[in-house]
Image (tube, rainbow, N blue to C red):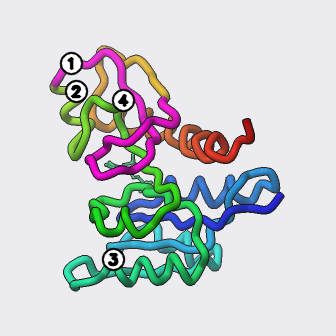
Amino acid sequence: MVKKNACIFISGQGSNLKNLIQKSRDYNFPIKIRLIISNNKKANGIKYAKRNSIPCVIVDTKSRNYEYKIFNEIKRYKISLICLAGYMKILSKKFLNFYKQPIINIHPSLLPKFKGLNTFSRIIKNGEKKAGCTVHYVNEKLDGGNIIVQKTFFLDTDENENSLKFKTQKLEYSAFPEAIIKIYRKN
Ligand code: GAR
């Protein structure tokens, strides 16, 4: 199988990145992770790049034109899929217009509910019965693009933010790879 070159964007822990690196070792998984972008030089996820010898570019989002730097790297590595895996920065309209190939994001809620930040605390406060995660295409609207995969579970009566995060992320580790497979599945 000819694998597509993918780039994973991270900002922090990198557990989804770690999971995708593992999945991508499978001969039948459609992507090869060629590049990692982090907007945080202290992100834990950078260590997975090092351990797996994947080039990692750290960008300073305070510098003007940092997206231009990202775009050049994306071109250099012939990236045909961008996966936002806990990348806590919004891509500009300009970037979305330049990069014509799929960009997907994972979000820890059942979109369109609970877009944006502090998802878990808002879910608990709102007394939700169901929670889950969503993988969707990225467009100009925050957490607003078409949904590719969504996975759901029912909250326990004594659910708290930590348990909710744990259960949600466990689902993310199957949702993200499934979404990537779905994108390249031949109809
Ligand atoms: C994930 O739970 C992801 O859904 C969330 O950040 C976490 C990153 O974890 N993304 C967002 O909240 C984006 N709005 P990881 O760094 O361990 O993969």
Front label number (3 vs 1): 3
Q: Is residue 155 above or below residue 137?
A: above
Q: Which region shows up in magenta?
A: 126-150
Neighbor class of circle 4 (other Cα within 10 Å; few <14, some 14-19, many 20+) is some
Does residue 61 lie above or below 128 as drawn?
below
Mark 1: secondary structure:
loop
Q: Is tag 3's residue or tag 1's residue first in the polypeptide sequence?
A: 3
Q: Nearer the viewer, mark 4 or mark 1?
A: 4
Amino acid type of disc 2?
A: Ile
Q: CA distance from mark 1 to mark 2?
A: 5 Å
Q: CA distance from mark 3 to mark 2?
A: 35 Å
| Crowd class of label 1 (few under 14; some 14 to 19; many from 20; radius 10 Å) | few
Q: Work out how far the residue at label 4 is from the one at label 1, CA to CA, in angstroms.
A: 14 Å
Image quadrant occupied by the C terminus: top right
Tell me the residue that label 1 is attached to.
127
Kindly report which numbered mark, 3 or 2, lies closer to the viewer in this rendering.
3
Disc 3 secondary structure class: helix
- For disc 4, the marked residue is 110
Q: Are marks 1 and 2 in contact (CB under 8 Å)?
A: yes
* Relative to 158, 50 lies left or right: right
Q: CA distance from mark 4 to mark 2?
A: 13 Å
Quadrant holding the N terminus? bottom right
Image x and y of residue 176, in percent: 55, 45
Regarding mark 4 in the picture, which secondary structure is present there?
loop
Q: Amino acid at mark 3?
A: Glu
**Which mark, residue 67?**
3
